Image (cartoon, rainbow, N blue to C red):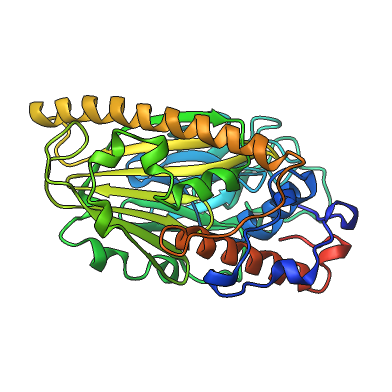
Amino acid sequence: MQTDAIHLPAIPAADLESPPLAQADTIPSRWYWDPAFDRLDRDAVFARTWQGIGHAGQVRSEGQFFCAEVAGNPVIVIRGKDGVLRGFYNVCRHRGGPLAVEPEGCVRALQCKYHGWTYLLDGSLRGVPQFDRVELFDRKDYGLVPVRVAEWEGQVFVNLWADAPPLESYVQGIVEQIAPNRLGALRFVWRVEYDIACNWKVYVDNYLEGYHVPHVHPELVKLYDFQSYRTECFDWYSLQHSPLSGTANLYTSGEGEAFYYCLFPNYMLNILPGRLQTNLVLPLGPARCRVVFQYFYTDPDAPSVRKLIEEDLAYSDAVQREDIDICEQVQRGVESRAYDRGRFSVQYEEGVYHFQRLLKGAYRAFLAEPGTNGGSRP
């Protein structure tokens, strides 16, 4: 994906600095609505971070695959005959046709839907119809372009950037923090998507703080001990957690602890006793995003768990509708003449500050690289 200098925003150096939380401003409003920042987000952030795009249940068997889009690029993840999970650009090396057009499936080989070039599951080119008269052509030079892929606790991630740190460094410590919860043992149950009229950063900001909960989620506030609410920040993720209130209700068993992780930039893990909800926030333009929710449970076929799932889904949808409404109103606010930037609550908005500091770092590193303004590829 090429980067054109005329599409990159000019950012004052001071806006990329991160003073201490108690002294810091929030990011400028322009970052939430200017198309130049939508382009910068794609190249400097999404193309260079680990993106959680699916789960292991989709690719357990030989030939199983699923497709996704990452930073505007089509990708495919597939299980090989040797059991190895591989990622590739979903792009034929002939003239850019798609290898798969369905979201997921199972195949013996990958065949381009445009001209029929065929690739083995390891990405090597096998079949090239009507190409016998072509000179200086070697199939070994035209295998699929690989994409970094990794599995963690039943979730599948890809990264388009060859120089990114390994996924393990992004998630280090989470497994130990949530014990005895075991995310990899949970089974996928449900997926739902919401299209929202706000910039993806508005949605992430909202997720990362409990400051709004008493005002936006009157039912949700009853579930947790907000006197014990706290945020912890790590290299690549932040954690919001609080003991449950102890009162049984639709959304919890009334005991244990809730963990809310946000892996920079756009992937959330909502962990409650016996279940996991993942949220993936995808930009759809300067002022729109899509949030993909996936739900995982222990023993989802048990009658008691089926009832819990039904109640959870209804409750979660109600909370999400409240978040959608406030995020869309905030988008209108940050686009107004009245707003440029604000300040952080030290008690409740450390997670937002942490996210915006990582965002500034991603912008700063990308814009400082040689060739960025000349059309380099991420």
Location of residue 374 in the rendering, given as x and y in whole percent from the top left corner: 88, 63
Identify whether 278 is placed above or below 288: below
* For residue 279, above or below residue 144: above
Q: Quadrant of residue 320?
A: top left
Residue 100 visible, this orientation: no
Which residue corresponds to the image point at 66% horizontal and 43% vertical from the top-left? Answer: 91
Percent position (x, y) of residue 56?
34, 47
- Residue 167 x, y percent position in the rendering: 45, 65
Using the rendered view, name the quadrant where residue 48 is placed.
bottom right
Residue at image x 90%, y 53%? 6
Q: Position of residue 318 (x, y in %)?
A: 36, 27
Front in this rendered view, residue 331 or 119: 331
Is 11 on the left-hand or right-hand side of 194?
right
274 vs 62, left or right, is left
Visible residue check, residue 304: yes
Q: Kindly identify the residue that appears in the image at 46 percent across and 63 percent down.
A: 350
Q: Is residue 154 left or right of residue 287?
A: left
The quadrant of the image that shows the C terminus is: bottom right
